[in-house]
């Protein structure tokens, strides 16, 4: 496993308890990935950096991109963003809105900076869900943002982590077991689904099995 530093950036789903964690990794899916890699590869496990911040939208990432991504010069960069861009559209219509076209423009600029100033392998996570109902307004609205992320992956030769797809498939299975505590923020099962989907997606670039 040649990668030395894996940096995760995103919103509260990524931050997930980081501020009260002495290792600054948190208690969510990033912690599960960290612990898996630490135990599976004890002699060559990578450094994990969690730069998630609660309530962030794509525009918030842009405002801190230099300090929280470029200056870290990661070997692998994982981005998980989009939930708040949609959630704020639905719950706070008076806030300046970030529609899919603007979301894509900002995302493309951020990825161009990564391409031009680092050698990082790029991993793009689909946003997960808004409400644990496959056809909720939030999940229907998310579809356009998921499509933008796939377009960015094609343009920048990035790895896609199909987290939205994984969550929707789980909801269609109708197991009656929750993945979130409030329709958005993960419980331990939701974090496990995110971590497992990430590990499966990145095995080629990480050199893991």
Image (tube, grey):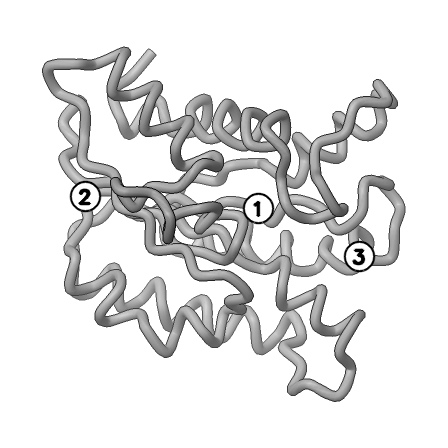
State the count of labels.
3
Helix, strand or loop status at disc 1: loop
In this orientation, which residue lies closer to the viewer: 144 or 14? 14
Give the alpha-carbon distance from disc 1 to disc 2, as whole Å.
20 Å
Give the alpha-carbon distance from disc 3 to disc 2, as whole Å.
33 Å
Label number found at residue 126: 1
Q: How many residues crowd around disc 2 within 10 Å: few (fewer than 14), some, or many (20 or more)?
A: some
Placement of the C terminus among the 4 image quadrants: top left
Please say if 166 is above or below 78: above
Q: Residue at x 47, y 34 (%)?
A: 29
In this orientation, which residue lies closer to the viewer: 144 or 183? 183
Helix, strand or loop status at disc 2: loop
Q: How many residues crowd around disc 3 within 10 Å: few (fewer than 14), some, or many (20 or more)?
A: some
Spot occupied by residue 84 in the image (x, y as percentages of width and height): 62, 64
Q: Residue at x 19, y 49 (%)?
A: 74
Q: Residue at x 39, y 41 (%)?
A: 26
Helix, strand or loop status at disc 3: helix
Q: How many residues crowd around disc 1 within 10 Å: few (fewer than 14), some, or many (20 or more)?
A: many
> Can you identify the residue that label 2 sits on?
75
Give the alpha-carbon distance from disc 1 to disc 3, as whole Å.
14 Å
Spot occupied by residue 197 in the image (x, y as percentages of width and height): 52, 27
Q: Answer with left or right where residue 149 lies relative to residue 72.
A: right
Spot occupied by residue 125 in the image (x, y as percentages of width and height): 50, 44
Q: Answer with left or right where residue 208 lies relative to residue 119.
A: right
Looking at marks 1 and 2 on the same chain, the residue that comes earlier in the sequence is marked by: 2
Spot occupied by residue 157 in the image (x, y as percentages of width and height): 37, 47
Looking at marks 3 and 2 on the same chain, the residue that comes earlier in the sequence is marked by: 2
Q: Are marks 1 and 3 in contact (CB under 8 Å)?
A: no
Label number found at residue 138: 3
Question: What is the quadrant of residue 41 in the picture?
Answer: top left
């Amino acid at each position: 496993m040649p990668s030395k530093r894996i940096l995760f950036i995103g919103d509260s789903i990524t931050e997930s308890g980081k501020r009260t964690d002495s290792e600054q990794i948190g208690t969510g899916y990033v912690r599960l990935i960290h612990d898996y890699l630490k135990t599976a590869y004890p002699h060559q496990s990578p450094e994990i950096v969690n730069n998630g911040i609660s309530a962030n939208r794509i525009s918030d990432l842009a405002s801190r991109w230099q300090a929280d991504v470029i200056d870290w010069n990661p070997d692998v960069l994982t981005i998980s963003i989009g939930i708040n861009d949609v959630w704020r559209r639905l719950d706070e219509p008076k806030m300046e809105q970030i529609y899919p076209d603007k979301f894509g423009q900002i995302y493309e600029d951020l990825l161009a900076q990564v391409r031009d100033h680092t050698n990082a392998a790029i991993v793009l996570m689909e946003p997960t869900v808004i409400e644990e109902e496959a056809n909720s307004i939030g999940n229907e609205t998310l579809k356009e943002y998921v499509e933008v992320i796939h377009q960015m992956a094609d343009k920048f030769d990035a790895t896609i982590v199909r987290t939205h797809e994984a969550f929707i498939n789980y909801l269609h299975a109708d197991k009656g077991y929750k993945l979130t505590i409030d329709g958005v923020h993960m419980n331990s099962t939701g974090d496990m689904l995110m971590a497992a989907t990430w590990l499966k997606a990145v095995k080629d670039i990480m050199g893991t099995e």
